[in-house]
Image (spheres, rainbow, N blue to C red):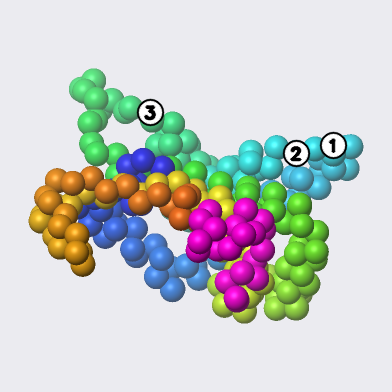
């Protein structure tokens, strides 16, 4: 997800972090919950309709991509959902816009980067998590039972999240096995000493997230296996 928060450095990182931070405040997240639930219900209904028509195989990544696009459209442009979708697709489709004088608007596309980054990485996480649950029916049953118990017939809300222990374990294991960002690039903007290491200004540092997440030394011999309980060990 080049260009967005995980890949940004220095002033770019600070600027983008300042923009996105308010969206993750508690009250703001609570206000998004209804949109998320509604979009998810619509996606599930679409899947059920296709099943009734006899479809047995699905490209689940396409559904997750549409789901995250719908949620972002609703939360960013709640006053006009249809207009929100149009703006979202313009931003994420690398479209350029001409002003009245025929000049190209040449900004830094911060909003485009933010929307596209959140869209792509979240869709990837959801796709891999669904795949892992489908491949591990025992965990699928555990998570389903937990959600039913915690929600108790009510619509899911932000307040339920901290109580969904098993679901969070599954998501964390999904992120470990299939991190949306495989590497994290950073650059030193000044000379820095880290322990015995002297890091000169201008040095590029690449953090190999995927390698770390698949290290036997850290995670054990079953490093490539799906085991949500490993964080309890």
- Rounded to the nearest angstrom, the CA distance separating label 3 from label 1 is 35 Å
Q: How many marks?
A: 3
Q: Is residue 17 above or below residue 56?
A: below
**Dot 3 lies on which element?**
loop
10 Å neighbourhood of mark 3: few (<14), some, or many (≥20)? few
Residue 177 x %, y %: 57, 53
Is residue 196 or residue 125 the one in the foreground? 196
- Residue 71 can be seen in this image: no
In the picture of the structure, the residue carrying the numbered disc 2 is: 58
Numbered disc in front, either 2 or 3 = 2
* Disc 2 + disc 1, Cβ < 8 Å: yes
Instruction: Name which residue lies at 64% across and 59% down.
Output: 222
**Dot 2 lies on which element?**
loop
Numbered disc in front, either 3 or 1 = 1
Instruction: Name which residue lies at 63% across and 49% down.
Output: 128
10 Å neighbourhood of mark 1: few (<14), some, or many (≥20)? few
The image's mark for residue 55 is 1
10 Å neighbourhood of mark 2: few (<14), some, or many (≥20)? few
Write down the region rendered in magenta.
214-233
Q: Which image quadrant is residue 38 in?
A: bottom right
- Rounded to the nearest angstrom, the CA distance separating label 2 from label 3 is 29 Å
Instruction: Name which residue lies at 58% across and 63% down.
Output: 220
Answer whether residue 232 is magenta in the image.
yes
Q: Which image quadrant is residue 57 in?
A: top right
Q: Which image quadrant is residue 108 in?
A: top left
Q: Quadrant of the C terminus?
A: bottom right
**Dot 1 lies on which element?**
loop
In the picture of the structure, the residue carrying the numbered disc 3 is: 95
């Amino acid at each position: 997800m080049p260009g967005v928060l995980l890949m940004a450095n220095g002033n770019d990182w600070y600027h983008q972090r300042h923009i996105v931070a308010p969206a993750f405040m508690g009250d703001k997240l609570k206000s998004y919950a209804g949109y998320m639930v509604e979009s998810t219900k619509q996606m599930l209904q679409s899947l059920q309709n296709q099943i009734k028509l006899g479809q047995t195989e699905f490209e689940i990544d396409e559904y997750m991509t549409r789901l995250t696009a719908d949620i972002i459209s609703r939360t960013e442009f709640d006053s006009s959902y249809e207009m929100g979708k149009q703006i979202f697709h313009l931003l994420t489709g690398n479209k350029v816009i001409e002003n009245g004088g025929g000049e190209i608007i040449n900004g830094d596309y911060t909003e485009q980067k933010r929307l596209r980054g959140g869209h792509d990485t979240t869709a990837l996480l959801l796709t891999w998590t669904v795949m892992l649950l489908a491949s591990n029916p025992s965990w699928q049953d555990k998570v389903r039972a937990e959600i039913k118990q915690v929600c108790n017939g009510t619509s899911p809300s932000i307040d339920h999240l901290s109580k969904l222990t098993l679901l969070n374990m599954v998501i964390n294991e999904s992120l470990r096995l299939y991190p949306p960002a495989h590497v994290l690039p950073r650059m030193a903007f000044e000379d820095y000493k880290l322990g015995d290491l002297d890091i000169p200004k201008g040095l590029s540092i690449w953090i190999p997230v995927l390698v770390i997440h698949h290290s036997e030394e850290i995670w054990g011999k079953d490093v490539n296996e799906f085991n949500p309980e490993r964080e309890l060990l």
